[in-house]
């Protein structure tokens, strides 16, 4: 009998403190996110959202407690090991996009598959080439104009750059997708088409989606909402 897969995220008694800080900025007693779940994270500036995302992506490690992502206890893994884990298993839509200015639009989208043989293999199961999957994702995001694709990414509008960053995060079907304010530069119509693609791609590959946004109007589209200001016990000291 097959064993069930571990949760996408399992946190117990986690505490995180920035170097040199007098106290912890994130204290979570327990958090569990199931595989395939669509989680909306809400919270004002300073509530710990960016810190939590950095921990889930293996950029930071907690000083105490356990942090399991896809069954891997990240607090026990070396910095290089976390880099490899992130490349293989996590797609990340950065708030500031982090596109590479000297690469084309398609090259930016296929970049994760250059660093991860696993994501490359998954992409090539669906399409004959990486470029074909990139064009498929870009087309869903209304970025199929050949003239547009030939421009340097720095010549694209902010909204266009945001959609390129989303396509890059989706390529190769990562098991976990972290989206940090991914719709902030999109108008309502583009936001709806973007979310439709995001949900479609995540459902097709069983990807867990963790989505941070200040747009509370998007909340009903998700399975549940995490109100981090209420959950983060480090905030309770200020009440």
Image: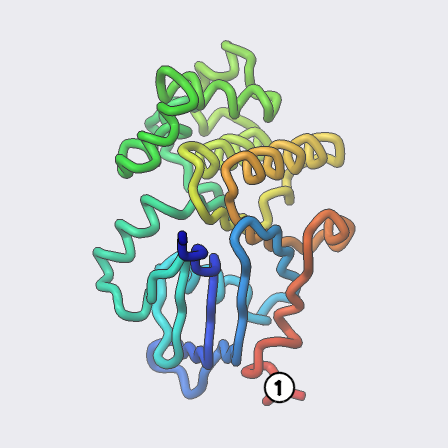
Crowd class of label 1 (few under 14; some 14 to 19; many from 20; radius 10 Å): few
Could you tell me which residue is drawn at 38 percent across and 60 percent down? Answer: 71
Could you tell me which residue is drawn at 35 percent across and 23 percent down? Answer: 124
**Residue 30: x percent and y percent?**
53, 76
Quarter of the image where one finds residue 122: top left
Q: Relative to 229, is 105 above or below?
A: above
Q: Relative to 27, is 52 above or below?
A: above
Could you tell me which residue is drawn at 48 percent across and 60 percent down? Answer: 7
Residue indicated by mark 1 = 236
Query: Residue pushed farthest front?
Result: 1
Looking at the picture, tell me which residue is in the foreground, 12 or 178.
12
Quarter of the image where one finds residue 54: bottom left
Determine the secondary structure under disc 1.
helix
Colouring mode (rainbow / by chain / secondary structure / one colour): rainbow
**Residue 33: x percent and y percent?**
54, 61
Q: Relative to 178, is 230 above or below?
A: below
**Residue 22: x percent and y percent?**
41, 87
């Amino acid at each position: 009998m097959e064993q069930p897969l571990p949760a996408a995220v399992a946190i117990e008694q986690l505490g995180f403190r920035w170097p040199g800080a007098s106290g912890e900025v994130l204290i979570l007693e327990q958090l569990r996110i199931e595989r395939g779940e669509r989680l909306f994270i809400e919270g004002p500036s300073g509530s710990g959202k960016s810190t939590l995302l950095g921990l889930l992506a293996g950029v930071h490690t907690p000083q105490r407690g356990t942090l399991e992502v896809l069954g891997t206890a990240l607090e026990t893994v070396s910095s290089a090991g976390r880099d490899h884990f992130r490349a293989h298993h996590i797609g990340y839509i950065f708030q500031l996009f982090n596109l590479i200015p000297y690469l084309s639009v398609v090259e930016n989208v296929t970049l994760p598959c250059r660093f991860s043989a696993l994501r490359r293999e998954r992409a090539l199961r669906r399409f004959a080439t990486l470029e074909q999957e990139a064009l498929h994702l870009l087309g869903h995001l209304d970025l199929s104009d050949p003239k547009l694709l030939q421009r340097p990414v720095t010549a694209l509008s902010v909204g266009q750059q945001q959609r390129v960053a989303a396509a890059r995060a989706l390529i190769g079907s990562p098991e976990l997708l972290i989206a940090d304010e991914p719709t902030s530069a999109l108008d309502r119509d583009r936001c709806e088409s973007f979310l439709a693609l995001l949900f479609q791609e995540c459902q097709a590959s069983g990807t867990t989606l963790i989505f941070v946004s200040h747009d509370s109007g998007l909340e009903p589209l998700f399975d549940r909402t995490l109100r981090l200001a209420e959950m983060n016990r480090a905030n309770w000291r200020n009440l």
